[in-house]
Structures are given as C-alpha cells and as structure tokens.
Image (spheres, helix red, strand yellow):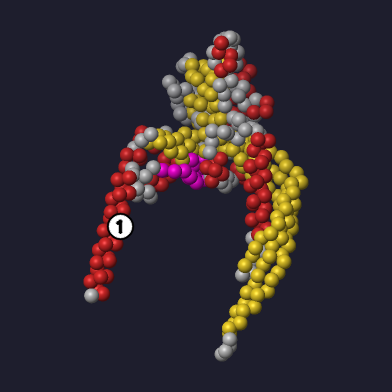
Amino acid sequence: MPETQTTLTYDCPRCGAALSFNSDSQKWDCAFCNGSFTAEEMEEILRQQQAAQVDDPLEQCEGAGEDHAEEVTVYTCPSCGAQILTDQNTTATFCVFCHNPAVIAGRLEGAFRPAYVLPFVLKKEHALQALEGLCKKKPLLPRDFTSTHHIEKLSGLYAPFWLFDCQVDASLSARAERITSWSDSSYRYTKTDVYQIERAGEISFSHLPADGSKGLDDSMMQALEPFNFGQIKPFSMAYLSGYLAERYDESARDLAARVHQRIESTSRMLLRDTVAGYTNVSPGNCSVSMRSERADYAMLPVWLLNTKYKGETYHLAMNGQTGKMVGRLPMSKGRLAAWFGGVSGILFAVSMLIGGLIK
C-alpha cells in the first residue's frame, strides 16, 4: 500500500478559503474575501495551523505493498477529502477535484528543507503570452499545436536547485602571435612577434545553480539562466502555495563533478578573455584549484510545458522570474514542403530571368 501523509493548506484567517501566492504583489491573496497577507503574517498562520493540526487517522499498511512505499504516496485533501497519489519527491500540488493548493507535510523537513526560495515574478498569463509569441515566430509550426489542448498544459514548478559558492585559484599559459604586414615599391613584408602569455588569479563563484532533479533536463535548466539572486528569500513553505514543487533526488555531492567541470571551463574562458590585442592565440595548460566550496539548497521558479504531439513529447521551460524561454517545438512537414516548394519556385523564376537577360 502507498504511504499516507497529511497535507497542509494555507487558509485565510478571515474567511477560511485557500490562499495563493501573488507574484505581482509578492503577497498571499484570498480570492473570496480579497484579503492579502505578507510573508511574516503567513509564517504566523503556519505556526497556528501546525499547532492545531492532528495526525492523520489512516495508518500505514504493512506487507506486500511495502516495497512501493517510497514510490507512491497518498495525500488527503483537507478541503474536499479526496485522496490523491503523488510520487515521493512531490512537495506541493493541487487537488484535481476541488483545485485546492496543498503542501505535503513532512516532505520538506530536515535535510530536505531548502535554505532559500526565489519567488515567482511572472504569472501563468505571462508564460502563456510568451509561448504564444514564440509560436507566432515559427512559420513551420503545426497550426493545431497552438490549440488550448496543448498550450494550457503549462505548470508553475518550484524546482530543486543547489546553489554553489566557491573560491578557485586559476592559471593559464598561452602562445600568442602579433602579425604586422607592410610593403614598399618592391616587396611585401610580414613580421610575426611571438609571446608566451601567463595569466593567474583568484575567481569567486556565488550562487552557481545546478538542478537537483533527475526528472529535469540539465541543459534546459542551465539555459534558463541567469536568475536574479538579489531577490532570493529565506525559505518558507508559504511560497509554494498555488504552485507545484519537487524536492531534490540528486544531492550536492551527486552534482559536484558536473559543477566542477562548469567552474573549470568558465575559469578557463575568463582567463582566456584577458588575452587581447593579438592576431592569434593558442591556449596551453590551464590549472584550476578549488580552495573552498559550499552548496545551499534552494527552490527556483520555472514554468514547464510537457506535451505530446502526434506521439512525440516536447518540452519547453520558462524562467519564472525573467521570462527567458527555452525548448523545442514540432515542425509541420506540410508547411515545410510548401515553404520549400515556394522557395524553389522563386529560385527557378530568378534563374529563368537571369538566363533571359544573359541571352
């Protein structure tokens, strides 16, 4: 049997309706009584609700289903009483029956409690507009892909990230050439000056993000950068209300090799960029040594579109703070053939015209 856990919703202290985070005001709003609450007020609401919360009466079953306890979890919606299945990493979701936002209690405690959260700035409407604008710029996109059936599958997700801070000592050697040419009435001269270049320095990396979810595409998440970490907040579960959220299933140690590779390549590029004013530069040995390193667990805002079109899955993502969008869209074979035929016809007409002019 799946594990059963309780859920936590944030109820308006005025009318009892569910509260949702407003990315415009950075407050929590009630759609029924128009109440609006700050982060400090939400923390007090959370403390009061946790103090009044009682244990779920359902007991965890033992036996044949025990092997699957970590894979599937049942949560009970406190609004309508429906039971919904989630996977082990889901920390915030919606009830599919009453659409009440809920945070699954206990999923973000201990080592799984983030240190920081970067709140959503852009609402779903902004994500929809950005997606529709992107689709309009793709003349080979199938017409029916932009139907409501596909576009409305956008989901706001607080994705688990590790933010790495580190200090590195880096050095680079390179061979550079400066070539000068001139001529007189009889000869043309070329002078090549050769230099041995040495560069070294200390480089600091702050809040270098790496996603901690196996289910998210690493290259896509990296392409969403940069994030403005000047707006980062100490973590509060209240920010998750109204969005989906997942906890990490890849630790900072699991990501260390990938992050170190990125740090080394970035350090090499930064040192290489200081070698300017030469005709040719051939980089040589590069050494990167890390002196200190730490990683903080944080949740970052991402709008996701995962949809199937004619048997193939397409993934798009948008930075929920800046609006930067990345991903892949389908291509209409019919439109491609028509476009190719049109271009071929134009080229044929131009070639005939040129041929006539030559005669």
At 47% across and 22% down in the image, what residue appears?
Answer: 95
At 29% across and 62% down in the image, what residue appears?
Answer: 347
The picture places residue 268, in percent across and down from the top left corner, at 66, 55
- Image position of 110 with respect to 146: above or below: above
Asked if one can make out residue 289 in the rendered structure from this viewpoint, the answer is yes
Name the quadrant of the N terminus.
top right
Q: How would you rate the neighbour count of disc 1 (Cα within 10 Å): few for under 14, some for 14-19, many for 20 or more?
A: few
Name the quadrant of the C terminus.
bottom left
The picture places residue 289, in percent across and down from the top left corner, at 74, 49
Q: For this rendering, which residue is in front, 32 or 211?
A: 211
Looking at the rendered structure, the kind of residue marked 1 is: Val
In the current view of this chain or complex, which residue is farthest to the bottom?
Answer: 185
- Image position of 207 with respect to 106: above or below: below
Q: How many marks?
A: 1
Q: For this rendering, which residue is in front, 327 or 178?
A: 178
The residue pinned by badge 1 equals: 343
**Residue 126: which quarter of the image?**
top left
- Image position of 247 with respect to 337: above or below: above
At 49% across and 16% down in the image, what residue appears?
Answer: 83
In the current view of this chain or complex, which residue is farthest to the right?
Answer: 291
Q: For this rendering, which residue is in front, 349 or 100?
A: 349
Q: Which residues are magenta?
A: 317-329
The picture places residue 107, in percent across and down from the top left corner, at 60, 24
Judging from the image, what secondary structure is the residue with disc 1 in? helix
At 48% across and 25% down in the image, what residue appears?
Answer: 94
- Image position of 265 with respect to 177: above or below: above
The picture places residue 280, in percent across and down from the top left corner, at 62, 67
Asked if one can make out residue 123 in the rendered structure from this viewpoint, the answer is no
Residue 91 part of the magenta segment = no
102 sits to left or right of 358: right
290 sits to left or right of 42: right
**Residue 40: which quarter of the image?**
top right
